[in-house]
Amino acid sequence: MLKRTVDPTPRVASIPTPSMTYVPLGQFGQGERKLTGGAQHRALASSDAPAAGQVVARPFPQCGGDELWLWRFLLAGRPFGATGAAAGGPDDGATWLSAAEHSLARRLPRTQMRHRFLSERIALRWIFGRWFRCSPAQAPVPAATPGVSSLECDGPHGKVWIDMAHAGLWLFVALGQGPVALAAHAPTPVGPDDTALVSAQSGDPFAVARDAAHRLCLARLAGEGEALASGGDVPLLAHPYVSVPYAGRTRYLYDMSVSSRLTVVVARDSIVHRMRAFGWQN
């Protein structure tokens, strides 16, 4: 008679590489209309939205159940940092925000917290304005809660889940038809006293940051907040697309790192076959 044994080691397995489509940021919501030159630049502003009363025949873009949408915004440019003559104009994302959003931002105690909150709200208004084909100021964005970057809300085709993550001057946004978690992590500078830590990671000084981002993303998906789950038995992941048993169920992890120095990872409870990455090109 065979004796049944249970292997306590998490079974990490590589999964199929999703189909990737890289799209210029300004192309989102434009359908098949290709933007070039100045039109592509204006697409980051509300001035590129259809005029009031204009009939738009093309359907709203739809994110499939096995699909993820990703955005990468540079916070140093429009619509996040309009300056000079553009300040207060259609390219200034601050003009899109409601009085309630500005009031919430003013109550935050630190400048960095205010900047993070405002940039997330501007990005959401840009996305939903392009998605619903309305001005960002009129976009049906989810209710604002400072410090909460993981949201459930209604899209044109039903409920969607959104998560956002910051890294330096970059803001990353992920959207899908199901719970989604996003994490971005840059490595901490390695000092002379960290030689042992680096050597423990097979000589890769960025492995620690990559591992932290993976753990943080899994913890966020499991509803554990910002805890890095250091006690969780999750091995260092070498493959960019893996399934990982975590917190009682299988999670699917997709490492979308834009460089060796910045880890960006997204996780879901179901496998992803297609990804559309807006503004992800170098």
Image: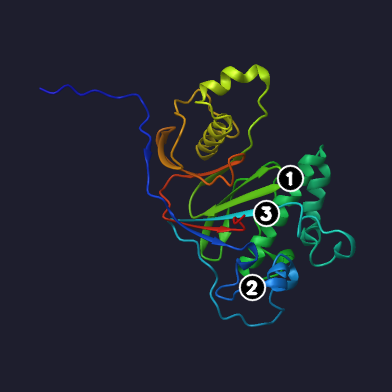
Q: Secondary structure at mark 2?
A: loop
Q: Residue at image x 89%, y 61%? A: 84
Q: Which mark is residue 116?
A: 1
- Coordinates of residue 109 in the picture (x, y in percent): 82, 37
Query: Which residue is label 3 attached to?
Result: 73
> Residue 194 occupies which quadrant of the picture?
top right
**Mark 3 against mark 1, which lies toward the viewer?**
3
Q: Residue at image x 69%, y 46%? A: 145
Q: Earlier in the sequence, mark 3 or mark 1?
A: 3
Q: CA distance from mark 2 to mark 1?
A: 29 Å
**Mark 3 against mark 2, which lies toward the viewer?**
2
- Coordinates of residue 103 in the picture (x, y in percent): 82, 49
Marks 3 and 1 close (CB-CB < 8 Å): no
Type of amino acid under label 3: Phe
Q: Earlier in the sequence, mark 3 or mark 2?
A: 2
| Disc 2 packing (10 Å; few <14; some 14–19; many ≥20) | some
Residue 37 left/right relative to 94: left
Q: Between 157 and 173, which is closer to the camera in this rendering? A: 173
Q: Secondary structure at mark 3?
A: strand
Query: Which residue is label 2 attached to?
Result: 35
- Coordinates of residue 153 in the picture (x, y in percent): 58, 55
Q: Residue at image x 74%, y 66%? A: 45
**Quarter the N terminus occupies:** top left
Marks 3 and 2 close (CB-CB < 8 Å): no
Q: CA distance from mark 3 to mark 2?
A: 18 Å
Name above or below for residue 114 compared with residue 227.
below
Q: CA distance from mark 3 to mark 1?
A: 12 Å
